Image (cartoon, helix red, strand yellow):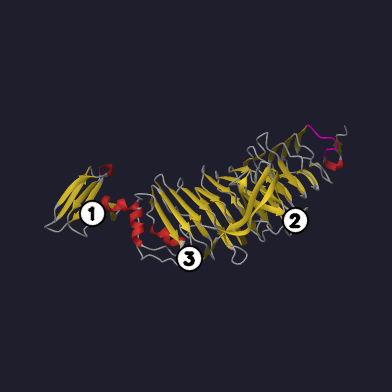
Amino acid sequence: MTHRVDRDKRFRALVELEPTTLAAALAGDNGQLAVVTDQAGRHLYVREGGSLVPAIEERLRAVTQSDIYMRVDGSGGTTPPAGTRVVNQDEYDALGYDLLSIQDALDIIPPGVAHLVYISVAAGRYPGNAPYFGYTASFVVPGFIDFGGYLYIQGESKTTIEVAQAGTVTDSKHIQRSAGTWTVDEHKGKLAEIKTGVGAGKVCPIAGNTADTLFVAQNLTTGACTFEINEPAAILEPGNAIGFSVSTTLFFYLDNLTFGDTTDPYQTILLYGSANLQGCSGYFAAYGWIYVYGTGLNSTMWYCSFEFTRGQINVLDTGSYLTIGATYIYGDPTETGTDIPGLLVIGEDSRVRTHYPIFEVTDGSATDPIIYSLGSYVNMRHNDTYIIGNGLCTGIYAEHGVTVFAQQATAELYIENCGTAVEAAKGAEIQLELLGTPSTSNVNGFVISGGARVTAVDPQNVTASGNELDLDSDTTATYSDLSVGDTITGPGGSSIRRTS
């Protein structure tokens, strides 16, 4: 028999049941009709937008029903049958095996995440396009719906490069070993972890090393410690672009993973919404990028080390928000065939908040800016930021709009070994507060053109072999509290220098 129900001409349901079936009509969510039946294999469908879709009792399986802990093993796992879905821990345990890939785990999660979904990834190399979800020809499509849950993908182990050894934290950025020697910069890009003593548990991305001392992107307390040097042991090496795309509010974590290496370079990461990278490393070649999307939402990078050969981190979506903390970002920012240079590119009305990161250009011929701003807000919070060049590139370049650096009075901005420390053009306004004492070895301090404006409050020891502040005829600048020897150079070569 067939039953048709009309409610205020806004809802219509078509129910088809066997003649002998017992059925009871119930009020469903939002006043919709639901049916409970004893007929196996029969389902109620409701008509929405001209299509028949599963009714309420079937839709319950579209949302997690408990926390779910899964394990991925690329050498001993199994791919579940097509169409498999698990909504609670019991259903996952009933599979009786580890999964072969991260994609397998993502495929069996229901689209609604209301609990913690934790995916543990065994050591090994994971080739192909896994994990790969939410990335289509239309670029980014939300892959999961937030019902107050978390999606956490974590590598199980690390590859130990140096076993735990005694050392001393000599200042906030340096760890000195007690015995033995290293080759200079052999550990650049790796991660040091303090095991005991001051800072125990902190992960410190290594920006370089001498024979006995590590230079790290961290904020440490001086004192004795033991530390080890390692890298994530789970390596994701897809051959194409990869999208980590979630709903606009679902918290999504990637922890202790390597995104490709020099053997099989990773290409692109898309971080959409509230995506978080923790303790990760990566090698980005052949136009490799990290894109950050999500208006008004905060993605983060903590304790990471990323090397770029041609790409960069892009925060270009209007209103995007990225926090970079204790992270080392380095490489060659040159981008052949495009006019968007830089290791970090920040779009109009987007924001970046930093906690003691280090940006460095190590290529000897690169001339592009390290940080490129199109009218954005950069908040250094209460921690120092280092921008280290190769003697040719610009430290900070801005055009259009207002760019703010070093907003907190206790933070210092260190710009070292750049062709130009700060350059403003095309009507940009840069507000700088407290340039740190080690802002040295720059060929030029400030270059301003095209009606741009720089406000530099208390710029300490911004030494350069060329001009401290170079202006064109359409430009004004407020340069308060000039240090002895600082120079303002105007059109035609005229200059003002403080001598005492």
The image quadrant of residue 284 is: bottom right
Please give the label number shown on residue 449: none
The image position of residue 124, as x and y in percent, is: 53, 64
User: What's the residue at 61%, 57% (across, down)?
Assistant: 230
Instruction: Specify the segment rendered in magenta.
Output: 481-488
Sequence-first disc among 2 and 1:
1
Alpha-carbon distance for marks 2 and 1?
71 Å
Q: Callout 2: 10 Å neighbours few (<14), some, many (20+)?
A: some
For residue 240, above or below residue 144? below
- Name the quarter where the N terminus is drawn: bottom left
Alpha-carbon distance for marks 3 and 1?
40 Å
Q: Main secondary structure of the magenta part?
A: loop
Alpha-carbon distance for marks 2 and 3?
37 Å
Q: Amino acid at mark 2?
A: Ala
Q: Amino acid at mark 1?
A: Leu
Residue 94 in view (yes/no): yes
Question: Marks 3 and 2: in contact by CB < 8 Å?
Answer: no
User: What's the residue at 20%, 51% (across, down)?
Assistant: 36
Sequence-first disc among 2 and 3:
3
Q: Amino acid at mark 3?
A: Gly
For residue 455, above or below residue 201? above
In front of the other: label 3 or label 1?
3
Q: Which residue is mark 2?
A: 211
Please give the label number shown on residue 74: 3
User: Which of 151 and 393 lies nearest the eye of the viewer?
Assistant: 151
Q: Which residue is mark 1?
A: 44
Circle 3: element type: loop
